[in-house]
Image (tube, rainbow, N blue to C red):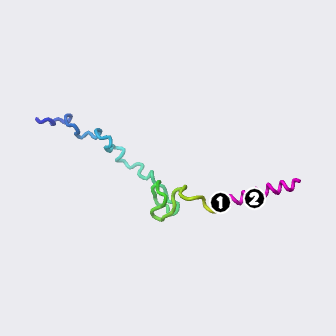
Amino acid sequence: MGRYDEPDDQPYGDDESDDPEAPDASDWTDEDEDADEVACPACGRAVWEEAQQCPHCGEWVRPGARGPAPWVLFVGIALLVLLAALFVLTRVSGR
């Protein structure tokens, strides 16, 4: 018999635990296959969560990738002007 006739004597045998980088059973399952994907707001197709633009239609996907919509800024500024005008009118009419 040779030196490595018994499986326990083999230095690297079939034991995957020797290599910390070796895949284990959790790597072979695809339970969370689409966990890192989100739906594109424009076309609805699956896009990687880290993507800034949809590779299918080019729409921006990430919420922080661009600023707020122009109408949101307009409404916010209009409300501030309206509140300032009401403040001034109540101060002037109170004299």
Q: Is residue 40 magenta?
A: no
Whether residues under marks 1 and 2 lie with C-beta atoms below 8 angstroms apart, the answer is no
Q: Quadrant of residue 16?
A: top left
Q: Is residue 16 left or right of residue 63?
A: left
Alpha-carbon neighbours of circle 2 within 10 Å: few (<14), some, or many (≥20)?
Answer: few
Check residue 73 in the rendering and tell me which mark sits there, or answer none.
1
Q: Quadrant of residue 23?
A: top left
Q: Amino acid at mark 1?
A: Leu
Check residue 90 in the rendering and tell me which mark sits there, or answer none.
none
- Residue 56 x/y as whole percent: 45, 64
Residue drawn where x is 43% and y is 53% of the image: 34
Alpha-carbon neighbours of circle 1 within 10 Å: few (<14), some, or many (≥20)?
Answer: few
Q: Which residue is mark 2?
A: 82
Helix, strand or loop at disc 2?
helix
Q: Is residue 82 magenta?
A: yes
Which numbered disc flags the more N-terminal residue, 1 or 2?
A: 1
Main structural element of the magenta stretch: helix, strand or loop? helix
- Residue 11 x/y as whole percent: 21, 37
Camera-side residue of 34 and 51: 51
The boundaries of the magenta stretch are: 72-95
Q: Is residue 88 left or right of residue 67?
A: right
Count the numbered circles shown. 2
Q: Amino acid at mark 2?
A: Leu
Helix, strand or loop at disc 1?
helix
Disc 1/disc 2 C-alpha distance (Å): 14 Å
Furthest toward the left, the residue is: 1
Furthest toward the right, the residue is: 95
- Residue 15 x/y as whole percent: 26, 39
Residue drawn where x is 72% and y is 58% of the image: 79
- Residue 48 x/y as whole percent: 45, 55
Residue drawn where x is 23% and y is 39% of the image: 12
Q: Is residue 33 left or right of residue 13?
A: right
